[in-house]
Image: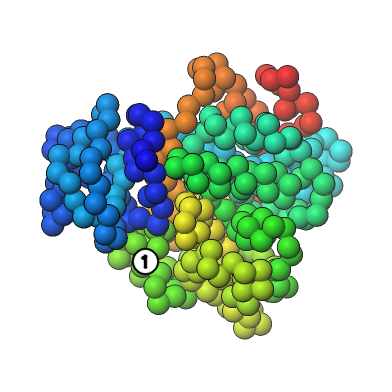
Amino acid sequence: MLQHAPTCSYHNFYSRTLMPVSHYGLWTRIGLGLRIVGFGFFVHTTDYGFNLQRMLYRKCRVVNTVSSTFAVYRVANHSEFCILTQEISYNLNGTYPNRYHSYIAASYVKFVEGAGARPVPIWIGENRSYYEDILSKVNGVLWPGGSTYFFQKAGYADAGAKIYRIAKRINEEGKYFPIFSICLGFELLTYVAANRVEHRTSCSSNNQPLPLEFTHDFRESKLFKNAPPNVLRILAEQNVTANYHHLCVTKKDLRSVNLTDEFHVLSFNHDKNGLKFISTLEHRQFPFYGLQFHPEKNLYEWVTGKKIPHGINATIVSQYFANFFVNEVRKNLNEFRTKQDEQQSLIYNYPVTYTALQNSSFQQCYMFTKSDRNKFFT
């Protein structure tokens, strides 16, 4: 079963290896007898035995049949990346009392922009039809870190649960829709996958830059399989992952909610008390990724005393994650219905505030009132 043109992809392509191919002329997959004519695509391959009889669409054509499952993607020429807002933090509300309803730290906006995507805020406290609509227009979702509680009604976790169910269904239908999660978002990913059963463990990993302790099979993941050797070496040997969390997900926690078969654990770390926690993982079937650390801080947060790594190697690995995430987003071909709809949805319609001047842990924040949701749409 194939998707409708012009997506040009075999429907069951998750957990495949990404192989970038030339954007011009004739491509050849050496050793498989596969030749594809076209441009602007990516090819996924696996060693699974599957005899594809034919693929013929408007902008891609398989010339030879092969004994390998694969997918061909037309790469989106532009990408919109939704960033989930969250309840205004206690500290921000103390500085700007009762003025704002939700916020996004600007470092996440820059993180997305720095890899070539445009950010769209996605509001908390909305009904399912809103999330269905926005996920049909954008190309992926980022769940940022923060300091909110999962039990708050109509908040970050409620929105995340709706988004997760919708994104899962989209992928099950054969379309490619990625979710990327950082720190609190990482915890949200396993929380909603466990049907909102709390399973996190208290830990002490604040202001703690660490190297990753990779699992033996981490190279079999989508996240790291094609990572450059220097990136993997830096991640394994240097204190370049910025940790700022007091809750962790351990392997035991994952097992307690029956998620070990659903998620592939790629690395661990140890907190200040020696507790071993999961630091990176990805879904085994769908393009859902989780980082317990903060790659965006290495590039865009400069609060003193926070032990944020800012050296050249720290920025190299952070940019790798940004590029990987946005490249995943480019595989989704959703579009806004009109140019006006697109422009009115972008985060550039809202002001950014220099919050570090008020002793915030963020350099800048986008802070939203309840009425901002209806600024352009009713």
Image point 39% across, 49% down: which residue?
Answer: 12
Please name whichever residue, 268 or 244, is drawn nearer the observer in this view of the structure.
268
Q: Give the image quarter of residue 222.
A: bottom left
Residue 340 x, y percent position in the rendering: 55, 16
Q: Is residue 141 visible?
A: yes
Helix, strand or loop under label 1:
helix
Is 9 left or right of 185, judged from the image as shown? left
Identified by mark 1, the residue type is Glu
Farthest bottom residue?
A: 274
Image point 49% across, 41% down: which residue?
Answer: 173
Q: Is residue 356 visible?
A: no
Is 330 left or right of 107, judged from the image as shown? left
> Considering only vertical position in the picture, is 100 above or below 222?
above
Check the image and tell me how it is coloured: rainbow
Quadrant for the C terminus in the image: top right
Residue 40 x, y percent position in the rendering: 27, 34
Quadrant for the N terminus in the image: top left
Residue 261 x, y percent position in the rendering: 53, 68
Which residue is disc 1 drawn over? 220
**Category of crowding for the residue at label 1, using alpha-carbon neighbours closer than 10 angstroms: few (below 14), some (14–19), many (at least 20):** some
Please name whichever residue, 325 or 93, is drawn nearer the observer in this view of the structure.
325
Numbered marks: total: 1
> Considering only vertical position in the picture, is 141 above or below 220?
above
Q: Give the image quarter of residue 128.
A: top right
Residue 188 x, y percent position in the rendering: 66, 56
> Considering only vertical position in the picture, is 137 above or below 96?
above
Please name whichever residue, 62 or 279, is drawn nearer the observer in this view of the structure.
62
Is 75 left or right of 197, judged from the image as shown? left
Image point 59% across, 26% down: which residue?
Answer: 345
Q: Give the image quarter of residue 126.
A: top right
